[in-house]
Image (cartoon, grey):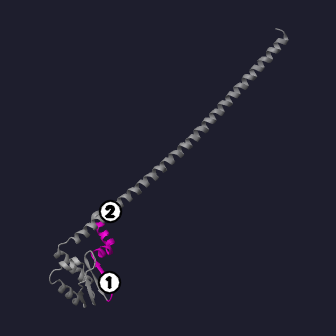
């Protein structure tokens, strides 16, 4: 081999070696870049996964809280419906009392609401017709014991039961409906404590 060919061969060998070294460096750099990209991608994926887990957990907590709230509302509504039904049945039961029991109740109401004044008492047409004998006398006696006087009006009122007291133009509504309405909250509380305590 001539000197020129040796030189050529040496230059080619060096060039090949230099290219192989550069290729090896490039491959190492590419592998480093690839590994770094994998690490970054894994770290980012881990962050996304953690955020997703936190989001899912938060969503489940909100859903559970929302379900619990709806459940409580439904239970409360059902309880209120039961209480109203019990009160309605009690009201209907009073309305359907036999005459003796009904007027015994009226007598107790008179004792509670009669004032120490002169006045009139009004009943429904039905109550005036079924009023027991001697009941007007009981009304007068109750008024006298309270320090007043009551006259039973023969003019009926359109009421559901109970009576209306009139003292000096001022009416005291003692109808069953009015008494129920006035005591609705208190009665509801009592029914609630009896049924759901």
Residue positioned 66% across, 33% down in the render: 33
Residue positioned 65% across, 30% down in the render: 31
Distance of label 1 from label 2 (alpha carbons): 33 Å
The single residue placed furthest to the top in the displayed view is 1
Residue 25, horizontal then vertical, whole percent? 70, 28
Q: Is residue 82 above or below residue 176?
A: above
Within the image, what quadrant is residue 185 found in? bottom left
* Magenta span contains residue 179: yes
In this rendering, position of residue 72 left or right of residue 36:
left
Tag 1 residue: 171
The label shown at residue 81 is 2
Residue positioned 82% across, 15% down in the render: 8
Kind of element beneath mark 1: strand
Residue 151, horizontal then vertical, whole percent? 23, 88
Q: Earlier in the sequence, mark 1 or mark 2?
A: 2
The label shown at residue 40 is none
Q: Dot 2, how many residues are within 10 Å of its Cα: few (below 14), some (14-19), or many (20+)?
A: few
């Amino acid at each position: 081999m001539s000197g020129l060919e040796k030189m050529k061969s040496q230059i080619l060998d060096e060039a090949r070696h230099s290219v192989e070294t550069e290729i090896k460096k490039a491959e190492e750099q590419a592998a480093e870049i690839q590994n770094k990209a994998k690490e970054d991608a894994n770290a980012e994926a881990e962050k996304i996964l953690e955020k997703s887990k936190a989001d899912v957990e938060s969503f489940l907590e909100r859903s559970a809280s929302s379900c619990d709230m709806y459940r409580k509302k439904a239970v409360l509504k059902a309880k209120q419906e039961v209480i109203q039904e019990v009160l309605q049945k009690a009201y209907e039961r009073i309305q359907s009392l036999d005459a003796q029991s009904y007027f015994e109740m009226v007598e107790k109401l008179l004792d509670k609401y009669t004032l120490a004044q002169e006045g009139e008492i009004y009943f429904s047409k039905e109550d005036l017709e079924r009023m027991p004998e001697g009941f007007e006398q009981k009304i007068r006696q109750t008024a006298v014991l309270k320090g007043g006087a009551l006259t039973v009006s023969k003019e009926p009122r359109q009421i559901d039961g109970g009576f209306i007291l009139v003292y000096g133009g001022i009416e005291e509504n003692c109808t069953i409906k009015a008494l129920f309405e006035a005591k609705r909250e208190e009665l509801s509380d009592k029914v609630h404590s009896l049924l759901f305590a």
